[in-house]
Each structure stands twice: as C-alpha cells, then as structure tokens.
Image: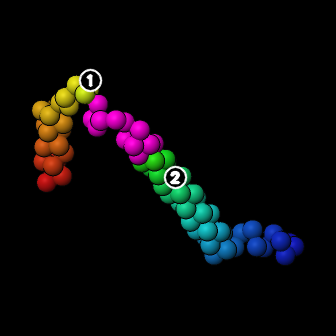
C-alpha cells in the first residue's frame, strides 16, 4: 500500500473534499441565478426607459381573479 492509496480512502479527507466541492457548486449556482435576474431587471429597465408611455396604451388590462385565487390557495396551503 503506497501513501497515495491511503489518502484516497481517508473518510475525513473525502468528506472535506466533498464539502468544498458542494460549496463551490452552490456558489456557482447562486451566481448564475443572480446574473439571470440582474439581466432580466436590466432588460425590463431598457424597455421601460425606451417606451414613450408606460404601460403602452394598446396593452390589455391584466387579469385579477385567477392570480388572486392562486395567491389565496398558496397562502392557505402554507397554513
């Protein structure tokens, strides 16, 4: 048994390596979601600034009943 074989089966070192890998993976995941939402907000801002009137006059009114029902169902399901 060589020295390198002993370190491959060391449970403490393996656990630390997995924890480090998980931390880097979560950091990349959170960073990618943060960039996605930053780009979405930036795109919304560009559209809003370039519009002469907000909301545009030819836009239909937003539905209220279905989103209100969905919000109520979510609120009740959490209780």
Which residue is at 28% across, 37% downward?
Answer: 54
Residue 55, magenta (yes or no): yes
Examine the rendered structure and indicate whether residue 48 appears above or below residue 6. Answer: above
Q: Is residue 67 left or right of residue 23?
A: left
Q: Where residue 11 appears, x then y in whole percent? A: 64, 72
Task: Give the camera-side residue of 63 and 12.
Answer: 63
Which residue is at 13% across, 37% downward?
Answer: 69
Q: Where residue 21 appears, x then y in whole percent? A: 62, 63
Q: Which residue is mark 2?
A: 35
**Real-space Cα distance between discs 2 and 1?**
32 Å
Q: Are the two marked residues, 2 and 1, in contact with CB atoms closer than 8 angstroms?
A: no
Q: Image quadrant for the C terminus?
A: bottom left
Residue 47, magenta (yes or no): yes
What element does badge 1 sit on? Answer: loop
Q: Where residue 10 appears, x then y in whole percent? A: 69, 73
Q: Is residue 18 left or right of residue 78?
A: right
Q: Which residue is mark 1?
A: 58
| Number of the label disc, if any, that sits on residue 4 | none
Which residue is at 83% across, 71% downward?
Answer: 4
Q: Where residue 50 appears, x then y in whole percent? A: 41, 38
Q: Residues within 10 Å of mark 1 (few under 14, many from 20)?
A: few
Examine the rendered structure and indicate whether residue 62 appears above or below residue 7. Answer: above
Q: Residues within 10 Å of mark 2 (few under 14, many from 20)?
A: few
Examine the rendered structure and indicate whether residue 9 appears above or below residue 77. Answer: below
Residue 21 seen by the camera: yes
Q: Nearer the viewer, mark 2 or mark 1?
A: 1
Task: Give the camera-side residue of 38 and 15.
Answer: 38
Choose the circle earlier in sequence order: 2 or 1: 2
Examine the rendered structure and indicate whether residue 52 appears above or below residue 60. Answer: below
Q: Image quadrant for the N terminus?
A: bottom right
Magenta residues, start to end: 43-56
């Amino acid at each position: 048994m060589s020295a390198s074989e002993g370190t491959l089966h060391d449970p403490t070192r393996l656990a630390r390596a997995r924890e480090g890998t998980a931390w880097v993976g979560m950091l990349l995941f959170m960073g990618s979601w943060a960039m996605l939402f930053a780009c979405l907000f930036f795109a919304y801002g560009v559209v809003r600034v370039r519009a002469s009137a907000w909301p545009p006059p030819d836009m239909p009114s937003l539905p209220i009943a279905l989103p209100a029902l969905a919000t109520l169902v979510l609120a009740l399901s959490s209780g």
